[in-house]
Amino acid sequence: MKRPNAIDRQIAVRVRMRRVAIDMSQEKLAAQLGVSFQQVRKYEKGINRIGAGRLQRLAEILQVPVGFFFDDISKPGTKQAQLPSYVFDFLATADGLALSRAFMGIREARERRCIVILAEAMAI
């Protein structure tokens, strides 16, 4: 059995990100996929690889095109910049997704910068 690679893990994060974005539980997704919620958890953590047929079904359930799972994924040997894993980890959480939505809703660049400064100060 082939182990998940970096692309498999990035796809896994996108599955979780989309599921959280549409406010769907792992249990509900599992029921629609016909698998256990533990299996969904393994998919979302990148522990188990997601096959092509299952990825197609996930796209239908999550109401996105299959290409959604591959957007911005760079191929080895290309010059396209790959996002650091902490960005995917952050966006895969409910709080991270909510914070990024709220942050992008702030129109004033100065106000967004103040929030960044505050977060950096709190992280120390």
Image (cartoon, rainbow, N blue to C red):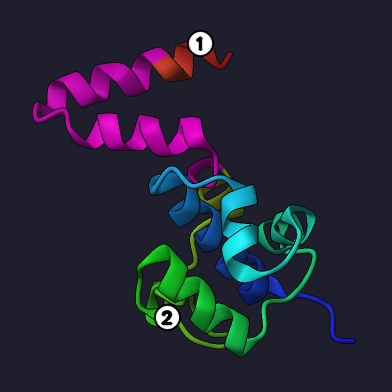
Instruction: State left or right for residue 27 relative to residue 57.
Output: right
In the image, the segment drawn in magenta is 90-118
Q: From the image, state whether disc 2 or disc 1 is nearer to you.
A: 2
Kindly state the secondary structure of the residue where label 1 is placed: helix
Where, quadrant-wise, is the C terminus in this rendering? top right
Q: Which residue does the numbered mark 1 point to in the structure image?
A: 122
Seen as rendered, the residue at the extreme left is 108
In depth, the one of 122 and 2 nearer the eye is 2
Q: Position of residue 32 (x, y in %)?
A: 57, 65
Q: Is residue 94 above or below residue 62?
A: above
Dot 2 alpha-carbon crowd within 10 angstroms: few under 14, some 14 to 19, many 20 or more: some
In depth, the one of 80 and 88 nearer the eye is 88
Q: Amino acid at mark 1?
A: Met
Dot 1 alpha-carbon crowd within 10 angstroms: few under 14, some 14 to 19, many 20 or more: few
Q: Is residue 122 above or below residue 24?
A: above
Q: Is residue 81 visible?
A: no
Disc on res. 66: 2
In depth, the one of 91 and 37 nearer the eye is 37
